[in-house]
Image (cartoon, helix red, strand yellow):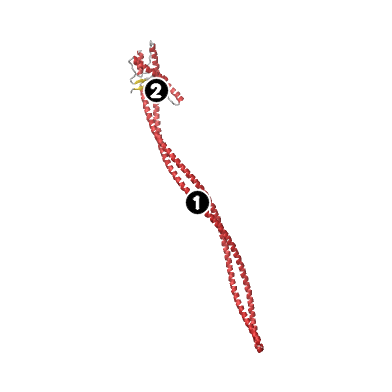
């Protein structure tokens, strides 16, 4: 019984290497000793597992601390990048708003161009109509000039005929003048003969005087007619020259009208082509106006999307700030966990374990951890129902020791139910 008490006291002080080897006469004591050895062995195995786990947690906490710090730094960089993206998004939104305004101005300008093109098209159409009217007028003028030229030719022919007639009349007048001179000579001869005849030729002398007087009058009338014929001939020549000038002018005018007609035809054709081109410009500007309106609407939509993106980016910035705080809390928690693990290792170091038992226990713990990680996906499970029953057995043993002996558990620990709490 004394050896059992000493073994329990040693175990209470943290020495789990001591094995009870006694030959108890009492069955209860022997069972208690066997149970104590089983409890000690299980407790030693559990503590070895806990030490191994504490070492792994310590290493993991250090790695987690490093990773958390790296993540926090990356989060800071992401936050900075997000802030830059936010600034770029704001700038992009401003530029898109500017583009939208410019597109609105462009749309208004295109509408003005369309209106101007419509006016130009109307003017070109009117010009084409007036060109066609000018063509018709020029054609009428050419027809009239042709008629004038024909009339002028007929007038020239008439003047030429009149000139010929005047020449014939001149010949007749000249013939009459010759007759009058001869008649005058005959009258003179008759007077001479009447004078020779004396009183018997007095009547004949009177007739001769009358004939002479008529001959002189005829000669004077013939001279006047000759003068008139010469005047008419001069005027006819002037008229003929005028007709020639008119004919030449008409011919020149006809050529000029032909040239004007050709020019008007070209103007009408160019006006038609201009109208067609303006209609194409109008159609193109209408399409451009529609496209500009669509682009303006798209720019407005992109501006709204940029504004939404900016708001979302602001939310991301706030979320990243919260994440940074959370990462800071995680780092603090990991550091606190590391401190607790250090404290746990210090507490576990208070127990003395067999070296061979530790090696075996580490191997079995490693195998158990591997199987558990494969089964549960890296989830570490510490303890077992056996451990809980051993703790309960240890608690009952300590209670029994307190009641039957003066031995008490190590002052470093006390047991409340199934939980061990430090009295530090």
Indicate the secondary structure of the residue bearing disc 2.
helix
Instruction: Report x, y in % for residue 10.
Output: 35, 17
Label 1 Cα neighbours within 10 Å, binned few <14 / some 14-19 / many ≥20: some
Total numbered badges shown on the rendered structure: 2
Up-down relation of residue 55 to residue 300 (above or below): above
Q: Earlier in the sequence, mark 2 or mark 1?
A: 2
| Residue 300 seen anywhere in this rendered image of the structure | yes
Q: Residue sitting at 43 percent across and 42 percent down?
A: 93
Instruction: Report x, y in % for residue 386.
Output: 42, 19
Label 2 Cα neighbours within 10 Å, binned few <14 / some 14-19 / many ≥20: some
Instruction: Report x, y in % for residue 325.
Output: 38, 33
In depth, the one of 337 and 206 nearer the eye is 206
Up-down relation of residue 193 to residue 48 (above or below): below
Which corner quadrant of the image does residue 20 belong to? top left
Q: For marks 2 and 1, give the one nearer the viewer.
A: 1
- On-image quarter of the C terminus: top left
Which corner quadrant of the image does residue 8 belong to? top left
In depth, the one of 195 and 65 nearer the eye is 195
| Residue 77 seen anywhere in this rendered image of the structure | no
Q: Residue sitting at 40 percent across and 24 percent down?
A: 53
Instruction: Report x, y in % for residue 273.
Output: 55, 53
Residue that badge 2 annotates: 50
Residue that badge 1 annotates: 115
Name the residue furthest bottom: 198
């Amino acid at each position: 019984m004394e050896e059992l008490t000493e073994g329990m006291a040693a175990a209470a002080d943290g020495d789990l290497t001591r094995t009870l080897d006694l030959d108890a006469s009492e069955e209860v004591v022997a069972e208690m000793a066997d149970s104590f050895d089983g409890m000690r062995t299980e407790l030693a195995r559990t503590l070895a597992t806990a030490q191994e786990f504490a070492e792994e947690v310590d290493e993991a906490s250090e790695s987690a601390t490093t990773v958390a710090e790296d993540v926090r730094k990356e989060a800071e960089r992401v936050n900075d990048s997000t802030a830059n993206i936010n600034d770029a998004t704001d700038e992009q939104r401003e530029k898109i708003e500017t583009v939208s305004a410019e597109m609105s101005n462009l749309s208004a300008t295109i509408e003005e161009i369309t209106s101007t093109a419509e006016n130009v098209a109307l003017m070109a159409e009117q010009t084409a109509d007036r060109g066609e009217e000018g063509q018709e007028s020029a054609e009428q003028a050419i027809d009239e000039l042709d008629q004038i030229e024909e009339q002028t030719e007929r007038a020239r022919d008439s003047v030429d005929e009149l000139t010929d007639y005047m020449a014939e009349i001149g010949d007749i007048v000249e013939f009459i003048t010759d007759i009058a001179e001869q008649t005058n000579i005959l009258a003179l001869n008759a007077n001479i003969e009447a004078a020779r005849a004396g009183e018997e030729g007095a009547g004949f002398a009177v007739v001769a005087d009358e004939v002479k007087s008529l001959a002189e009058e005829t000669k004077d009338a013939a001279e006047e007619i000759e003068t008139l014929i010469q005047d008419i001939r001069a005027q006819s020549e002037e008229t003929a020259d005028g007709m020639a000038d008119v004919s030449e002018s008409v011919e020149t005018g006809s050529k000029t009208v032909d040239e004007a007609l050709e020019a008007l035809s070209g103007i009408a054709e160019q006006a038609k082509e201009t109208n067609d081109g303006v209609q194409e410009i109008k159609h193109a500007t209408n399409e451009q106006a529609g496209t500009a309106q669509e682009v303006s609407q798209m720019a407005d939509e992109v501006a709204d999307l940029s504004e939404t993106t900016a708001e979302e980016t602001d939310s991301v910035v706030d979320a990243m700030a919260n994440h940074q705080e959370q990462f800071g809390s995680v780092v603090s928690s990991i550091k606190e966990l590391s401190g607790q693990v250090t404290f746990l290792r210090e507490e576990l170091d208070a127990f003395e374990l067999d070296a061979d038992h530790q090696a075996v226990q580490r191997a079995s713990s490693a195998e158990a951890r591997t199987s558990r990680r494969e089964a549960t996906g890296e989830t570490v499970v510490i303890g077992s129902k056996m451990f809980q029953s051993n703790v309960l057995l240890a608690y009952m043993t300590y209670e029994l020791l307190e009641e039957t002996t003066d031995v008490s558990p190590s002052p470093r620990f006390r047991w409340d139910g199934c939980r061990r709490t430090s009295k530090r």
